[in-house]
Image: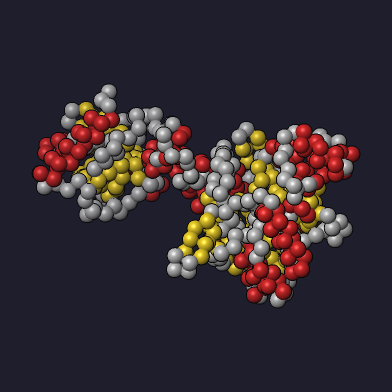
Amino acid sequence: MQDEPTLIRQRREKIRALRAAGIEPFANTFRPHHRVADLIAAYGHLDQGELEKLTATFSLAGRLMLLRQFGKATFFHLQDESGRLQGYIQRQEVGPEAYTFFKQLDLGDIIGLTGRLFRTKTNELTLAVQQFVLVTKAIQPLPEKYHGLTDVELRYRRRYVDLMVNPEVREVFRRRSRIIRFLRDFMDQRGFLEVETPMMQPIPGGATARPFQTYHNVLAMPLYLRIAPELYLKRLLVGGFQRVFEINRNFRNEGISTQHNPEFTMMEFYQAYAEYEDLMRLIEEMVAALAQDLYGTGRITYQGHEIDLTPPWRRLAMAEALTVVGQIPAEIVRDRQALIKLALEQGVTLRPSEGYGRAMAKLFDLHVEPKLIQPTFITAFPIEISPLSRRCQDDPELADRFELFIAGKEIANGFSELNDPEDQRQRFLKQVAAREAGNEEAHFMDEDFVLALEYGMPPAAGAGIGIDRLVMLLTDSPSIRDVILFPQLRPEG
């Protein structure tokens, strides 16, 4: 087999020869009137006799994916966005000059075809070509025939080739689009207004994460890519909107893994005169209805696990989960010093400003989260790790907060919102102290947000759903990179 540089050199020579012969190898004159999937849907059930009665001709455009030459006739596969169809071209039909030209085409070339439908002796629906035109000459060869693109790293780096040769990948992103469209419709039907908030912010907030920083030359000020839209969405509650949502891109300057990408998509939504339990029920209803819409059932399979999304879902307080799921004795969970000691013994790093709440959360990550396969809401978070949440009325050391876990992954996070401006200011100050002590993920002080709260924000609840992880779950994708078209990767070499 010839090496790639030789193949590329030959294709470049073909381009020069085409232009010398007056043929444009990158034309923009052909207009297809049909798609492969539409032809299969409309005529795929007809037998040969019924196809012979058709007087219509069909025009398609797509990429050559397979060529089998038999002297004076050639079978090939044409692929467009919607699927693949077999084509058949004969020398006696198109003429010797055109047929010779067709035989010189390469896999990957984009062509336009006009012809009629028939069935071969093996009963395959096929387009008999009457005319064709080269639309785009491909210089780079496709991956090795029949094997597609299997190198995972290369698939992510050259997603355009991955989409070209792996139809199941295209299906994942069609489903992603369908999922997002469903979520929009779901929220709209429940009276939520879709809004847009700044992606570049003078003060990053709404989550504990390290931001990306840039600089605006005209304003002569630093700006940050948003880590969350939360504080702006809550400003809208102050302004009088009662139900808002945003499907947004967020950016966090943190590690990359099968679960994390520095740039990711979330849906955040806020509802006035609601509490966190209202949103737990809303999310149950939303995800269950989404599964029904996609698959007609509330039961799905993810990486070998059968998961039942039918509400109601299990609810566990974080402390309870550490014992029931994590197998940490209840007496240790209740003892602040004993739990901190256990966390340190198990390799958890705690900063001077961090204590029992952070130790509890880290032990939860280690011993509980991976085991939460069936949908589970974890509630009663320590207030220490919930700087924007409303305090629990029965226990001020806890927050009215939940996180949703499915298949060992955090899917959503929500809470009853803190609307006391003085309490919020004090919590911001604690976050500032933590930042000054070296915690780069701690919140900045946001005086304008506190000012907004002083105008009065109605009691409310808010939540964020990780769209990428939700798509992973509903497409049985093991890595977040499988559901992001162009994931961030380390430089080659």
Count of numbered tags: 0
| Front residue of this view, candidates 323 and 201 | 201
Residue 209 showing in the rendered view: yes
Question: In the current view of this chain or complex, which residue is farthest to the front?
Answer: 437
State the quadrant of the C terminus. top left
Q: Residue at the location (55% across, 41% down)?
A: 256
Vertical arrangement, residue 481 with respect to residue 214, above or below: above
| Front residue of this view, candidates 409 and 332 | 332
| Front residue of this view, candidates 50 and 87 | 87
Left/right of residue 32 with respect to residue 322 in the rendered view: left
Left/right of residue 422 with respect to residue 267 in the rendered view: right
Left/right of residue 333 with respect to residue 194 in the rendered view: right
Q: Determine the image quadrant of residue 196.
A: bottom right
Q: Residue at the location (78% across, 47% down)?
A: 355
Q: Residue at the location (81% across, 37% down)?
A: 341
Image coordinates for residue 221, horizontal then vertical, percent: 51, 65
Q: Determine the image quadrant of residue 141.
A: top left
